[in-house]
Amino acid sequence: MSTFTMRLRALTWRHAIILGLIGSIILALSSHAAGAVRARGGVLHIMNLTSLTFGHFTGIMVVIMWIGVGLLLLSWMVAGGHILRHGHSLDAPMVFAWIAPLMFAGPMMSRDLYSYLMQGTLARDGINPYEHGAAANPGPILFEVSSDWRNTTTPYGPLHLWISELITTITGDNITAGTVVFKIVSVASIAGMIWSVNRLARYVGTRPSVAVWLGVANPLVIIHLIGGMHNENIMMALVLLGLVLSLRLRPLPGFLAGTVLIALAVSLKVTAFIALPFLVWIFVARWAGPGPVALFRESWKRLGTLMLSGIAALAITGGVIQAVTLLSGQTWGWIAEMAGNTKVINPLALPSLLASTLEPTLTRLVDDDLTFNVLVSAIRPFTTALMVLGLAVVWWMYRRDEMQALKGASLAYLVTCIFNSVTLPWYYAAVLALLAVWATDRRIIFIAAWLSATLCFMFDGGGNNRLYNLWWVLLIGAVMWWALRGATGYSPLRKPHQTDSWVLNEARVLGETQTPAPAPAQAQALKR
């Protein structure tokens, strides 16, 4: 065992809380200088410290922000080591230390919040956001919207616009007040996600502490869904709650309640729809029984239930979206605008990765006209077709029972993240939240944690990505692997007997303090 590993494992739970609190405070403070800094006004403007936002001070503040991210990750890894190796429960003080200071942070890693506020003012002032971009409504918020998006219509649904409209109606054009309200909504959404993941884990028999640690109280999720305040937080809170109700209530009420909640999520962002077909499989399994193991065999009862519940789910979803559209005063124009963010380019999306990899060679050896834009435009239709095919395959393969449906939902979101034309770090919040519920394979947990930690360093405070800096990516990936291996006592590259055992079963945690319940045969003998 290396000296680093020994020192890392010497850190107690209390040390992890302190490290996380310090890291989160540093993030909160540095966000006002190195985050998605406002062009006009803001905390530093009031304090006459705007010099921290440009020149050499900017570089210093960026380094300080990375230190905050690093401390938050170190705290998370140390806590994960205690949870996985010793069966420690993830408690409220730890989560509070990670999240609470970010209540006072400015937007970070993205300027999307300003677009949300701007879209709210459009809806508030009677301008159709599906026909006009932010520039149609000049005002103080417009200066904060990224220039790339000022003339772009919104791809989000009527619930998103309704929420943004309500917030800007209350706060007016006060950016600080609007940010605070969005921050409250974000924290409330994360709290809902934590509650739902906890319930889902208990239902399927995995450890809630592991599920919440990996799936929601994850620095990648915390930084982007609370720090960045992306609307995935509301979307996933609704989706997860819908899945909880579909499993915890009786089959029919659960199906109806779950469908309504997922439909509400779809009316906010269309990617919520990916979960709906798997909610249908949950209902089919609960109503008509589990499916056969054979891939191409199904019972008539299950097929009939599938057809009726599928039609009902689509009808309910359409009805809920129409109701939200009417109540919010919006239109269905968002359907035509869903491709509006395809101008986003980064190698997290497979089409962009392939185009950027092939372009240097093809332009030199084949044809100068084969530029990146030409290649990515040619590749995207094929990857979109692969995405649709992958979603269909996953939906059919993971249909047997409730557990299989949850696995299928997480894999479906992963397929979307890989093959979609645009992928951003916070899109993986859906994958993590669902995967963490059922994952008990140590390789899956470790790889998910490692990729999450690595992605935390791939976007800087203002939202610019560092994914094209290969040395940065390799260095961060290697350091995160090394640190996570030391904290958790496991690496997929080592043989099992060379690693520490993990506590992944709640029964094992309880078994240390409780007498195991008698087996069924023993229980019958005791009754006699």
Image (tube, rainbow, N blue to C red):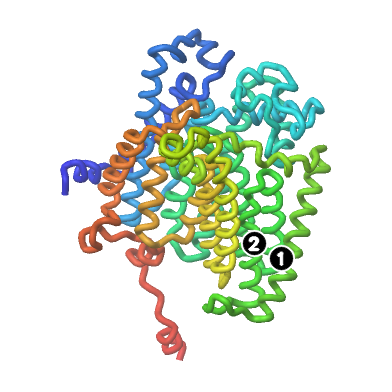
Residue that badge 2 annotates: 277
For the point 57% across and 45% down, the residue is 380
Q: Secondary structure at mark 2?
A: helix
Residue type at numbered disc 1: Gly
Q: Position of residue 126 (x, y in %)?
A: 81, 28
357 left or right of 315 in image:
left
Q: Mark on residue 323?
A: none
Q: CA distance from mark 1 to mark 2?
A: 8 Å
**Rendered position, 504 above or below 135:** below
Residue that badge 1 annotates: 310
Q: Quadrant of residue 59?
A: top left
Total count of labels: 2
Q: Residue furthest top?
A: 48
Asked whether 516 or 370 is in front, the reply is 370
**Quadrant, the C terminus:** bottom left
**Residue 169 seen anywhere in this rendered image of the structure:** no
Asked whether 446 or 385 is in front, the reply is 385
Neighbor class of circle 1 (other Cα within 10 Å; few <14, some 14-19, many 20+) is some
**Residue 500 seen anywhere in this rendered image of the structure:** yes
Neighbor class of circle 2 (other Cα within 10 Å; few <14, some 14-19, many 20+) is many
For the point 66% across and 44% down, the residue is 269
Q: Position of residue 163 (x, y in %)?
A: 70, 36
Q: Position of residue 171 (x, y in %)?
A: 69, 24
Q: Position of residue 356 (x, y in %)?
A: 46, 38
Q: Quadrant of residue 298?
A: bottom right
427 left or right of 26 in image:
right
**Rendered position, 239 above or below 227:** below
Residue type at numbered disc 2: Pro
Q: Are marks 1 and 2 in contact (CB under 8 Å)?
A: yes
